[in-house]
Image (tube, rainbow, N blue to C red):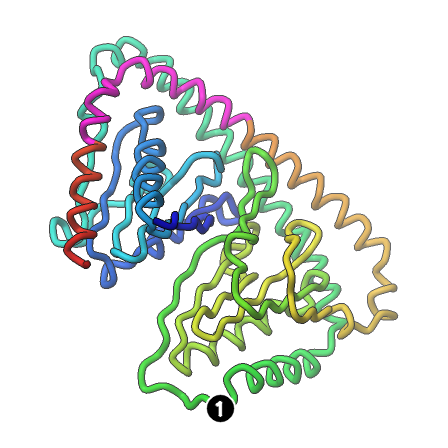
C-alpha cells in the first residue's frame, strides 16, 4: 500500500490582532462526518494522540493535514483526514472549540479524565503562577507585534502612494482571463477555506509552503509592502469563487486578514507571495514583481524613513519572537506538572478506541 502524504499548515497564529483563529476552517461542520474535540491540560498528550492517529492513517494510504501550533510548531493543534471527512482538534485555550452539532458531528474526548487531581492540587500555586506569567508574556508579545504592524503600515503607505494601481488591475484581468476566461459564472459559488501557511513562532518565522504548493502551475508574487500583491489575489479569488472553483486562502502571519497565498486545486494553479520573511525553493512558472509598478523617484524621496522603518520592524519582530520563546519555555515547565500526574496507559486505551472508531468510519465509505 502506498503511504499517504502530509500537508502542513497553521489554523491559528500570533498576530497583530493577538491570537487569531481560523479553527472553524479546519473542517467545516456541513462537510464533516465526525470532529473529535480533545480537551485536557498541557502535557496530557493531545498532540501525541493526534500524531499517532495521523500516522496510523498515513500507513493505510490516507492523506493527512497537520495543523501546527504557532506557539510550538513541533506540536499539533489538529489533524484532518480529508478522504473520510474526520478531524481531531485541540479544543483548549487559546483556541477553545466546543461542539456545534453535539453527537451528530462533534464529540469531546476529555484526556483530563485520566489525570491525578490530588497531585495537581498539590502544585496549584506553581501552576497558577506559571500560567499567569505565560499570559503576561503573550500579551507583551502581541503588543510588540502590533507595534511592528504599525511600522509595516507606514512602509505600506509610502509604497502604496507610489504604485500604479491601473497596472495591477490590468495584470489581474489578464491572469483571470488566462485562467478562467472560457468558464462561465457558476450558479453555485465555489467553497472557500481560510488558514495560515506561516506563523510567528518561538523559533522565528515558520512556513510550510513546500507542502502546500504542489499544483502544476505556480505563480510567484513579489513586491514591497503596500504594492498590491493582496489586491491581485483578492481579484483572482473573487473570480474563481464566482466561477464555482474551490479556493484555499492563506493569510499573513502579521496581518491575519491580508491574503498572501491562493490555491485553486481544480484549476491546478497556486499563487504565492515571496518576500524577505517567507519564500520557498520550488519550481514556478511565472513571477510578477510588483515593484515594477512603482514610481521609483517618489519612493526614493522617503529613503531615510524606509530604512528606519525596516530596522524598527525587524527589531520589534525579533523582540516578539524572543518573548514568545519565553512563553514556550514556561509552557514546557507547566507541562511537567501534568506529565507526572496523568495515567498514560488510560490515554493509550482511549487512543486505541478512537482509532478503532475512525477505521470503522473509513470502512463505511469503502
Q: Where is residue 245 drawn, in percent x and y? A: 41, 76
Determine the main secondary structure of the stretch shown in magenta: helix
Please tell me which residue is depicted at 16% across the width and 43% down the height of the picture: 357
Please tell me which residue is depicted at 57% across the width and 70% down the height of the picture: 217
Q: Which residue is mark 1?
A: 182
Crowding at mark 1 (Cα within 10 Å: few <14, some 14-19, many 20+):
few
Please identify the quarter of the rendering in which residue 235 is found. bottom right
Query: From the viewer's perspective, is residue 3 above or below residue 49?
Result: below
Is 332 a magenta residue? yes
Q: Who is closer to the viewer here, 319 or 221?
A: 221
The quadrant in which the C terminus is found is: bottom left
Is 167 a magenta residue? no
Give the side of residue 275 with respect to residue 79, left or right: right
Q: Where is residue 146 drawn, in percent x and y? A: 58, 46
Query: From the viewer's perspective, is residue 170 above or below residue 222?
Result: below
Q: Where is residue 80 drawn, in percent x and y? A: 33, 50
Give the magenta part as a residue range. 326-350
Please identify the quarter of the rendering in which residue 122 is found. top left
Amino acid at each position: 500500500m502506498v503511504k499517504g502524504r502530509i500537508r502542513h499548515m497553521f489554523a491559528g497564529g500570533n498576530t497583530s490582532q493577538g491570537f487569531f483563529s481560523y479553527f472553524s476552517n479546519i473542517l467545516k461542520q456541513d462537510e464533516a462526518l465526525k470532529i473529535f474535540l480533545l480537551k485536557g491540560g498541557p502535557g496530557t498528550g493531545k498532540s501525541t494522540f493526534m500524531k499517532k492517529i495521523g500516522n496510523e492513517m498515513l500507513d493505510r494510504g490516507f492523506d493527512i493535514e497537520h495543523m501546527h501550533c504557532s506557539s510550538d510548531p513541533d506540536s499539533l493543534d489538529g489533524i484532518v483526514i480529508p478522504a473520510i471527512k474526520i478531524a481531531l482538534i485541540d479544543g483548549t485555550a487559546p483556541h477553545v472549540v466546543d461542539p456545534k452539532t453535539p453527537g451528530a458531528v462533534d464529540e469531546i474526548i476529555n484526556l483530563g479524565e485520566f489525570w491525578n487531581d490530588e497531585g495537581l492540587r498539590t502544585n496549584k500555586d506553581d501552576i497558577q503562577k506559571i500560567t499567569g506569567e505565560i499570559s503576561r508574556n503573550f500579551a507583551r508579545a502581541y503588543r510588540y507585534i502590533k507595534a511592528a504592524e504599525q511600522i509595516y503600515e507606514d512602509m505600506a503607505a509610502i509604497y502604496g502612494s507610489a504604485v500604479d494601481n491601473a497596472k495591477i488591475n490590468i495584470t489581474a484581468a489578464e491572469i483571470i482571463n488566462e485562467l478562467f476566461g472560457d468558464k462561465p459564472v457558476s450558479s453555485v459559488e465555489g467553497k472557500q477555506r481560510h488558514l495560515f501557511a506561516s506563523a510567528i513562532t518561538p523559533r522565528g518565522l515558520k512556513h510550510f509552503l513546500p507542502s502546500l504548493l504542489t499544483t502544476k502551475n505556480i505563480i510567484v508574487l513579489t513586491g514591497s509592502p503596500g504594492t498590491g500583491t493582496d489586491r491581485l489575489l483578492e481579484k483572482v479569488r473573487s473570480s474563481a469563487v464566482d466561477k464555482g472553483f474551490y479556493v484555499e486562502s492563506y493569510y499573513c502571519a502579521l496581518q491575519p486578514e491580508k491574503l498572501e497565498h491562493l490555491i485553486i486545486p481544480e484549476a491546478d494553479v497556486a499563487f504565492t507571495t515571496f518576500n524577505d520573511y517567507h519564500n520557498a525553493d520550488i519550481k514556478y512558472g511565472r513571477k510578477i514583481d510588483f515593484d515594477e509598478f512603482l514610481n521609483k523617484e517618489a519612493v526614493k524621496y522617503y529613503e531615510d524613513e524606509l530604512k528606519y522603518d525596516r530596522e524598527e520592524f525587524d527589531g520589534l519582530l525579533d523582540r516578539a519572537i524572543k518573548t514568545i520563546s519565553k512563553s514556550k519555555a514556561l509552557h514546557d515547565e507547566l507541562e511537567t506538572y501534568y506529565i507526572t500526574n496523568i495515567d498514560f496507559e488510560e490515554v493509550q486505551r482511549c487512543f486505541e478506541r478512537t482509532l478503532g472508531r475512525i477505521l470503522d468510519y473509513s470502512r463505511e465509505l469503502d
